[in-house]
Amino acid sequence: MSTIEEEIPQHLRGNWAPIQDERTITRLAVTGTIPSDLDGRYLRNGANPLTGISDHPFVGDGMIHGIRLRDGEAQWYRNRYVQTPFIAEPDREVIDMAASLTDMTSSKANTNVVGHAGQILALEEGHFPYVLDGNLETVGATDYAGKLTGPFTAHPKICPTTGEMLAFGYSMMEPYLTYLRVSASGELVQSENITVGGPTMMHDFNVTANNIVFMDLPAVFDLELAMKGELPIRWSDDYPARLGVMPRTGTDADVVWYDIDPCYVFHPMNAYEENGKIIIDVARLSHIWRDGPMDFPAPALHRWTIDAATGRVGDDQIDDLPAEFPRVPDSVVGLKHRYGYMMANAAASAFEEPMSANGAILKYDLQTGERTSVEVGKGRLPGEASFVPKADPKSEDDGYLMTYVYDAGNDASEFAIYDAGSMSNDPVATVELPRVPFGFHGNWVPATIAD
């Protein structure tokens, strides 16, 4: 590796390197057969600094990569920057205390992209959502008709039963945590301040059929780091780790807190209620950012069991293989799931040396304990896989897994569709694409939402 390459931070090298061109490609080479029942858009968000430079993987500008499927065809691929204030003003301070507290449009909008109530939302956890149209052009930030006054999570949960979007926002200043509930028609109908131990970074949370479960964990805001312009979160050995259970329409007074061993969870797989207990499957890390802003221990799949009768939480490790970005089918969010999917090779070394990596998508059968995988090949790495059911599914896993796959040998990418039932290594279909940089979270947005 050259001296120049060594001077470039890891998160800006190789397939982390940003691309500035916004493309629309309508003539796409397809291998295999795209299922004709797929009518919608696969969209994925990620940090892609417009200037080509960023101080941390989490602070690049949001860029959406999308592919439109209809009638068995890949009609287009598009990549678009989310038009936040940082695109108009590239030199704007990323970590600006005043703007962070007063300007809720000052977002990078770079973490997730979801569809709800006829809108596509580009999300980042410190500010308002940004609305996109079906061609991925930015409509603008939304405050839900003035009812949203603070941050909105990058990880809302959409209830498959009610159609509600359940969310929260956390802040470095009080109120540190606010629970949010958006109706199926897109109206913010509940905003409830929740008492936590301090300014904790709550990246994600959990929902069940009847409850919300907050994760109050020891990654906390640090004013000194913020004043230096650094990523303002640090690990605290003195901050208790807890889970807070609240009815979905409840208030702060209804929250019941349960102590757990110190750890951090960026992403849960799913949660559900069974026999008076709450079961939560999570990608658990021992800690984060104890030794600096790039301190990410390898995560692995664990199961928490909250027992209200005893007031205790069991913690069982399901697997020791490093894995992240856990998902379940949207149809079982908050309900009992049998299957869960994760991205293997979640250790940083796989992305630092992709030519020697063996990328895979994992499937866990939580009923039998079996783990299977789609092996995408040496020197190839998939992103987070989204599950999309077939038109008339016969089982929970009767559907497709879709994601972008990076091929280090060709320095190019493809959109890949795999059969979630069989977990065959042979894709159902692939669509040839230019290089798509590694990103964060993606989702399938049906045409009924975006058209």
Image: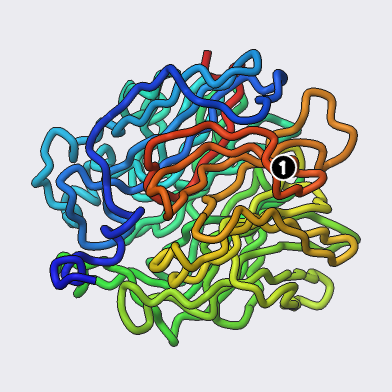
Q: Which residue extends farthest bottom?
A: 237
Residue 78 is situated, as x and y percent measured from the top left of the image, at 39, 26
Please name the residue that numbered disc 1 is placed on.
329
Q: Nearer the viewer, residue 103 or 132?
A: 132
- Residue 44 vertical position relative to residue 256 in the rendered view, above or below: above
State left or right for residue 388 relative to residue 197.
right
Q: Nearer the viewer, residue 31 or 104?
A: 31
Q: Residue at x 81, y 46 (%)?
A: 422
Q: Residue at x 27, y 62 (%)?
A: 56
Crowdedness of circle 1 by 10 Å Cα count: few (<14), some, many (20+)? many
Q: For residue 335, say whether it is visible.
A: yes
Q: For residue 124, say whether it is visible.
A: no
Q: Residue at x 36, y 44 (%)?
A: 110
Residue 104 is situated, as x and y percent measured from the top left of the image, at 28, 41
State left or right for residue 260 relative to residue 87.
right
Which amino acid type is shown beneath numbered disc 1?
Pro
State left or right for residue 222 relative to residue 272.
left
Element on which disc 1 rests: loop
Quadrant of the rendering where the N terminus is positioned: bottom left
Residue 48 is situated, as x and y percent measured from the top left of the image, at 29, 46
- Residue 272 vertical position relative to residue 21 in the rendered view, above or below: below
Q: Nearer the viewer, residue 41 or 191?
A: 41
Q: Residue at x 34, y 73 (%)?
A: 294
Residue 45 is situated, as x and y percent measured from the top left of the image, at 42, 41
